Image (tube, grey):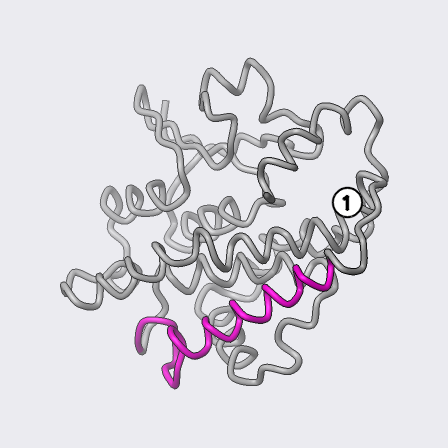
Amino acid sequence: MGLELYLDLLSQPCRAVYIFAKKNGIPFELRIVDLIKGQHLSDAFAQVNPLKKVPALKDGDFTLTESVAILLYLTRKYKVPDYWYPQNLQARARVDEYLAWQHTTLRRSCLRALWHKVMFPVFLGEPVSPQTLAATLAELDVNLQLLEDKFLQNKAFLTGPHISLADLVAITELMHPVGAGCQVFESRPKLATWRQRVEAAVGEDLFREAHEVILKAKDFPPADPTIKQKLMPWVLAMIR
C-alpha cells in the first residue's frame, strides 16, 4: 500500500497537507474523513489515529499524525524544492519559528472566528453573544498584526524571498475567517499582496480547489441533533 492521507478540506491543516502534496506531485490515496458527520470520532478512524484528529498519514505500516510532522515527513521523503523547508540553517530556523508560533496564536484565533461567527449559530444553532464574537475578532486582529509586523515585515513571503511551509500553513489558517465572512485582507494591503503571491506560487486552480469547502461554510445546513450531540464536546474542547 502506498501513501494514504486522511483529510477533510474543511480543516485548515488538512488543506496545507493537501496543497503541498498536490503541488509537489506526491502520489497519494485520499481518504476522506468527514468532520461534519463526526467520522473522526468513530472507532474505525481511531484505529488510524487514536487522537481522533485529521490530518493523518499512512505510509505502508507507518502511521503519522499532526500536520507539521506530516509536512516535514513529506519534505524529507520526497524530492521537493528546497525553498519549502530550506537546508540553510538560519532559513530553516525561520520556518521553524513560524510553525512553532502559529499553533496557539493565529490557528486559535482563526478557528474561533469561524466557529463563533458561523459554525455555532448557523451549523449548530447555538447563539454566540456579541461580546464573545467581538472579543474573538479583536484577538484575530491582534494576531494578524503580529503576522504582519513580526513575520511578513517587508518581505515577499513570511521567511524570505520564496514561499515556504510557513506561508502555506499561514494562508490555510487565514482562509478560515475568510470563509466566515471576516474582512481579513481588505484593510491590510500588505497581507493582501502576500496572499496573491502565495496563491500564484501554489497555483490558483489548486488554491481554489482546496478552499472550495471552507468558502461555502456560511451555507452549511443545520446539523442533525444526533450529530450535534456527538460533535459538541469535541468542538468545545477544540476552540477553548
Q: Residue at x 48, y 77 (%)?
A: 194
| Snapshot quadrant of residue 183 | bottom right
Span highlighted in magenta in the image: 133-160
Asked which secondary structure carries label 1, the reply is helix
What residue is at 59 percent from the left and 70 percent from the top?
141
Q: Is residue 53 left or right of residue 79?
A: right
Magenta segment's dominant SS is helix
Indicate whether 178 appears above or below 145: above
| Residue kind at label 1, given as amino acid type | Phe
Where the C terminus falls, by quadrant?
Answer: top right
Residue 210 place in picture, x, y as percent: 58, 52
Q: Nearer the viewer, residue 179 or 240?
A: 240
Residue at (51% x, 44% y) in the render: 14
Nearer to us in this view, 122 or 24: 122
Report the front residue among 24 and 193. 193
Extreme front residue here? 131
Say whether residue 122 is magenta: no
Residue topped by disc 1? 120
**Quadrant showing the N terminus:** top left
Q: Is residue 41 left or right of residue 93?
A: right
